[in-house]
Image (cartoon, rainbow, N blue to C red):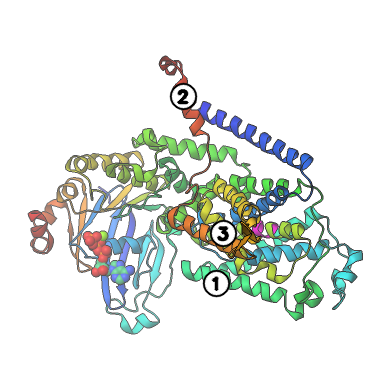
Amino acid sequence: MSEKKTILSVKDITMQFGGVVAVNNLTLKVREGEIVSLIGPNGAGKTTAFNVITGVYAPTNGEVKFHDKTIISNFPKGKMDKLYAGENKGKYKKTLEPTPDKITKLGIARTFQNIRLFKELTVLENVLIAKHMRMKANIFADTFRLNHKEEQKMREDSLELLRILDLYDVKDEIASSLPYGKQRHLEIARALATEPTLLLLDEPAAGLNPQETDELTDFIKDIRDKFHLTVFMIEHHMNLVMDISDRIYVIDFGKQIANGTPAEIQNNQHVIDAYLGVADDE
Amino acid sequence: MTEQKKHKLSILFSAIAIVVLALLLVGVNKYTAPTYMLRTVLQLGSIYALVAVSMNLLNGFTGLFSLGQAGFMALGAYTFAIFTIPANQRAGVYYLYGVADWLANIELPIVAALIVAGIVCAIMAALIGAPVLRLKSDYFAIATLGFAEIVRIIVGSSPMNRITNGSLGLKMIPKFPNFYFPFIVVAICIFIVWLLINSSYGRAFKAIREDEIAAEAMGINLAKHKRMSFIISSFFAGVGGALMAMYMGAITSTTFNITLTYNILLIVVIGGMGSLTGSIISSFLVIAAREWWLRFLDQPFFIGGVQIPLFKTGFRMVVFSIILMIVVLFFRKGIMGTKEFNWNFILKRMDKKQPAGGEGNE
Ligand SMILES: Nc1ncnc2c1ncn2[C@@H]1O[C@H](COP(=O)(O)OP(=O)(O)OP(=O)(O)O)[C@@H](O)[C@H]1O
Ligand SMILES: [Mg+2]
């Protein structure tokens, strides 16, 4: 069997805030169509890794490739030149720091650990906004409705998406008025509306009740198949992670301590000591 | 009732309301004396409505707290005045310093000059936008406030004497050609803003207001969209300033001091940040209260031959400010919050009146 194509490649990423090394020399790969999980204790640097991949932070060192193209690259300079406490200094020489909207345009969408919907806007508007970046009309044409067809297609696509994700009935509700579980769904719907090939989910099960968490496994697999996605996800619910993941990366204090299939991770003594031992008690 | 039917009825009601308002204006024009206060209040109120809407586009819809409105109004007003003062009157207006040669014979039609005033402001906004919009909220407010003061000072400074007439200001600015002129201009401008905020770009602005980080993660280019909002807001502030110049007929740089921005901000806050109809209603209310309903406070007031001491010039503004403070303290979201005026209150009633079985037919 031939190896599947690598879609995301994170190489030697270090993210240092002042003296704090939040992500330390992280290297990982996500292949096309996979569901890969990133796990680790609180404060391990998981969200920070996502923030680097999505352009929220420029890494201190290292690079990120997407579909074989380097999209992010940096090396310690300025004040960081002296302060740098990571590895692989000097290996990277390019500076490439796109803003998050550029990354999203390339086809990487994300959700947030603490839901970040456009709270005062309706469900439909939340999704429409995610479609805005693909709009071809300029502000003048759009204001005077010269792009009527485009606007209509945007609307139809958004409604279709809401239908698929079971949010059609609440399309005119204000986002913040939805129950928590629905808000999580809406965040995923909004991310899908950007037409990604890679979806990053930051703790999609956080705050869900046990039943909703159970349903999430099928839901994620479902959308992966329907939308031809690759999924990279941070999660604390071990049942969900073990059920759904093709592969798992474990980090602790910003450093990768293990990677492998769910079975391998469950039996890895390092991981049990650093993380699973604790998580099981919960 | 189906959504579609509701939508159609809303449009019908709005159309009727607009016709009624227009007829009322015609009535006011026909049956009131030219000096009647209501006329002034309506005209000035409409100008403030436009400027408040332009500020709201930035502050209420895009979440950029700007305090530069008076600066752009000054720029618009002066641009308009410079291009419209009748050529044969210029010698008289610039009697002290003389007029710059290139200016001496330029005279634009007023509609063209209104557009030029807007464009000059838009260009200025594009120029200062790049550095200023990068600042975080409080600093952005301070920077725009500073910009407004700089414009005012430059406009009134002596190197500008032959263009802006320095500290003497400009007069003989063409007045409104007729009673309806400001209403028509303002209605067109606000209609454009309304179209904008209900377009995809408008939604992007609101997304930035709601959550910058999420908006950016949804692919919205923050810098570009903030710049567009800033430019458009400044364009309409400039047109508003030009209308103000027409209304007053004479301007100096002090016309556009910080108090003006402060007044507009209060109108926006009272109307509701993020509500166009709120800004419009609030403009007329505030102007009516300040210029008309509270006027009596400035007159000497007697009870049984004894003069009540507080009632003298200036007391009006004290009472006005207190009322504003109360409104801001206790109705923090303003009259409308972020909602727009709608006809639901009537539509709901019509729904109830329908027989219970009526729904089945739809
Ligand atoms: N902007 C920042 N400035 C300074 N330190 C930061 C910043 N962002 C994150 N950190 C630090 O980086 C470390 C990793 O944080 P991160 O949010 O990535 O953890 P996490 O693995 O997502 O944890 P959790 O499971 O609790 O979400 C923490 O010590 C945090 O305080
Ligand atoms: Mg996290």
Residue A14 appears anywhere in the view: no
Q: Is residue B352 left or right of residue B16?
A: left
For the residues beneath circles 2 and 1, the answer to whether they share a chain is: yes
Q: Which residue is mark 3?
A: B320
Mark 2 neighbour density, 10 Å: few (under 14) some (14–19) many (20 or more): some
Question: The residue marked by circle 3 belongs to what chain?
Answer: B
**Of circles 1 and 3, which is in front?**
3
On the image, the x and y values in percent for residue B122 come to 66, 61
Q: Which residue is mark 1?
A: B143
Does label 2 or label 3 sit earlier along the sequence?
3
Q: Amino acid at mark 2?
A: Asp
- The CA distance from mark 2 to mark 1 is 51 Å
The residue stretch that appears in magenta: B235-239
Between label 2 and label 1, give the one nearer the viewer: 2
Q: Earlier in the sequence, mark 2 or mark 1?
A: 1
Residue A224 position within the rendered picture, expressed as x and y whole percent measured from the top left: 31, 43
Position in image of residue A263 (x %, y %) = 12, 51
The main secondary structure of the magenta stretch is helix
